Amino acid sequence: MGLPVRAAKAAILRGGVAGAAATAVLIGLGCQQSQPTQHGSGSPRAPSVPTRQHTSATHASVAPPPSATWPRSTAPRTIPSVREFTPRSGPGWKPGKNSRVVADLKGPLADEARTTAAELGLRTASGTPRRGDLSLAVAPGQGGGAEGYTLTVRKGSARVTGPATAGVFYGTRTVKQALRSGGKLPEGVIHDRPGRSQRGLNLDIARKFYTASWIEARLREMADLKLNQLGLHFSDDQGFRIQSDTNPEIVSPQHLTKAQVRRIVALAQELHITVVPEIDSPGHLGAVIRQHPDLQLRNAGGTTFPGRRGHLQAGLRPDRGPSDARVRPALPRPLLAPGRR
């Protein structure tokens, strides 16, 4: 009896080992073994959690779908917000390794293309755009006004068109802002135009001096926000802040040279910003009067008027005073803003 019992126990042990091995093989192949019903309850057991090895093998065996399904896009986050956005489903656009800014580099958009390419770290090119490119083009018959534009993002490429160069440039500002805020341009079509014809910043450098480099940095920020006018207030009682060759005595120690002003004006033109210079006259000329007290406005008795120490005396034409030929070569027209009061 002892030998048959030992043989039976060995057979049972061998069967258990074989069954465990078979189960391991099934699990390794990704098959799930059905669980037996618990005795006395009639309800099945919860399936066992696959091992890490099982999960990895399953993921490795699943092929990617033939075409990705993209969620519907949303409008880009920009300042100011775009007026109209038609969403589409797609990957959107962002600069890639082989992306280019494509435009007619001998045409009116050459500066806009080079500026945008430098900002995005891309090359410029002429000719037919290809997948992954950002292309710029003037479309004379397109609506929206001279500062309006259409930005189309489709199948991995982006295109900005507008009836004039200013509109196309503002479209590139939307591209720049959208990439900064969201990492890419959303799939779809943007139709945008400014809500006001004059959108500007007035900078009083007479009361507080600002360097040329600081002003140039503000110009670039203004362009990104699609502002189109910079007012430069050069003179007031506190200072006269632009170089004068014929009357250097009226110029404050801290001032802009004519060369610096020309550079500011040139950069502004590239960014579609008009510089509006202001030299106050006949009032607010305290900086001039301090050097030429004989020009002070006086009454019939020869005394100055209270509160009028910065006014030129009556009879002196404000358009022929120190604010005329001395600074005219550096400034665009219109030159003067005489007598605000």
Image: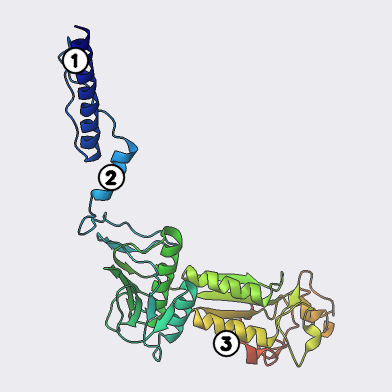
Precedes in sequence: disc 1 or disc 2 = 1
Amino acid type at image mark 2:
Ala
At 22% from the left edge and 39% from the top edge, which residue is drawn? Answer: 30
Quadrant of the drawing holding the C terminus: bottom right
The secondary element bearing badge 3 is classed as: loop
Measure how far apart labels 3 and 2 are at the Cα level: 72 Å
Crowd tier of the residue under label 1, counting other residues whose Cα lies within 10 Å: few below 14, some 14–19, many 20 or above:
few
Residue 297 visible here: no
Measure how far apart labels 1 and 2 are at the Cα level: 38 Å
**Relative to 307, is 331 above or below?**
below
Q: Residue 57: which disc?
A: 2
Q: Which image quarter: residue 100?
A: bottom left
Write down the residue under mark 3.
332
- 101 to the left or right of 269: left
Q: Position of residue 123 (x, y in %)?
A: 43, 80
Q: Residue 8: which disc?
A: 1
At 19% from the left edge and 33% from the top edge, which residue is drawn? Answer: 32
At 21% from the left edge and 28% from the top edge, which residue is drawn? Answer: 18
Q: Nearer the viewer, mark 1 or mark 3?
A: 1
Q: Which image quarter: residue 201?
A: bottom right
The secondary element bearing badge 1 is classed as: helix
Marks 1 and 2 close (CB-CB < 8 Å): no
